[in-house]
Image (cartoon, grey):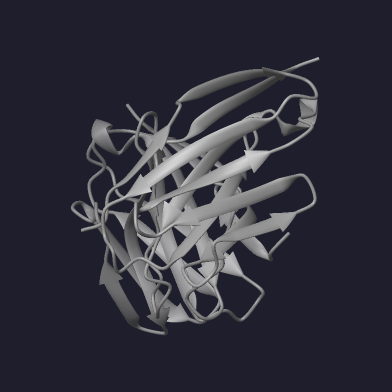
Amino acid sequence: GENVEQHPSTLSVQEGDSAVIKCTYSDSASNYFPWYKQELGKGPQLIIDIRSNVGEKKDQRIAVTLNKTAKHFSLHITETQPEDSAVYFCAASMGNAGNMLTFGGGTRLMVKP
Amino acid sequence: DAGITQSPRHKVTETGTPVTLRCHQTENHRYMYWYRQDPGHGLRLIHYSYGVKDTDKGEVSDGYSVSRSKTEDFLLTLESATSSQTSVYFCAISAWGAEAFFGQGTRLTVV
């Protein structure tokens, strides 16, 4: 089955700096890659996703890139703010009926004011 | 927020007792999922449903059963709770199998 590795497990940045979180996946059939943000005591919230026919997607300060050849994808957050502090999860699936998501282990992002 | 309600939000139970967690949605989405979240493991799929009375196993289904008698409700049952099932349980829904939206979670402690 699919295996998703996520790095780093913790990331501390200064407010205003950029943050990058990287994930690799094992199943070349995976074609849907969402990113979730989880705040303390809450459920994961979908913040951005990308499909395999696209190399990059942006939404304001957040961007995701995908390299299908290397089987890795990354989340980029620019101009970080204290409210970006949370745990971020990447996931992969075949995006078909059922859409069983396989998650990475998570990255705790801390933005220091 | 997607219309997902999990109940209870917190529960403490004793080893060997049965426990049922409920997920209720108001979005009329076809797909529903149960995940568990443990430190260092991210979220792992327990069971999922692709329609009323249609369910299947996920990665960590041993010790769990599910039922879906109505579109809006997906129940997760631990027939005989064990300490290894202490976890945070999340329900998720999806309209057509892609974008999945999660509930607020149920924190279950088995003592």
Q: Is residue B74 above or below residue A70?
A: below
Please identify the quarter of the rendering in which residue B39 is found.
Answer: top left
Q: Say which of B15 and B40 sits in front.
A: B40
Is residue A37 visible from the viewing direction of this image? yes
Front position in the image: B97 or A66? A66
Residue sitting nearer the eye, A91 or A45: A91
* Residue at the (28%, 43%) spot, across then down: B17
Residue B6 x/y as whole percent: 57, 55
Q: How many marks?
A: 0
For residue B18, above or below residue B52: above
**Quadrant assignment, res B14:** top left
> Residue pushed farthest front?
A69
Q: Is residue B41 left or right of residue B6?
A: left
Residue A109 location (% of width, % of height): 61, 26
Residue A15 occupies which quadrant of the picture? top right
Residue A40 seen in the figure: no
Image position of B72 (left or right of A85) = left
Left/right of residue A81 with respect to residue A54 in the rendered view: right
Q: What is the x, y in percent for residue A40? A: 63, 31
Quadrant position of the N terminus of chain B in the picture: bottom right
Query: What percent of the width, then of the height, locates residue A88?
Result: 56, 38
- What residue is at 51 percent from the left and 31 percent from the top? A107
Q: The C terminus of chain B appears in which quarter of the rendering?
A: top left
Depicted A79 relative to depicted A55: above or below:
above
- Give the residue at x 46% y 68%: A52
Name the foreground residue: A29 vs B103: A29
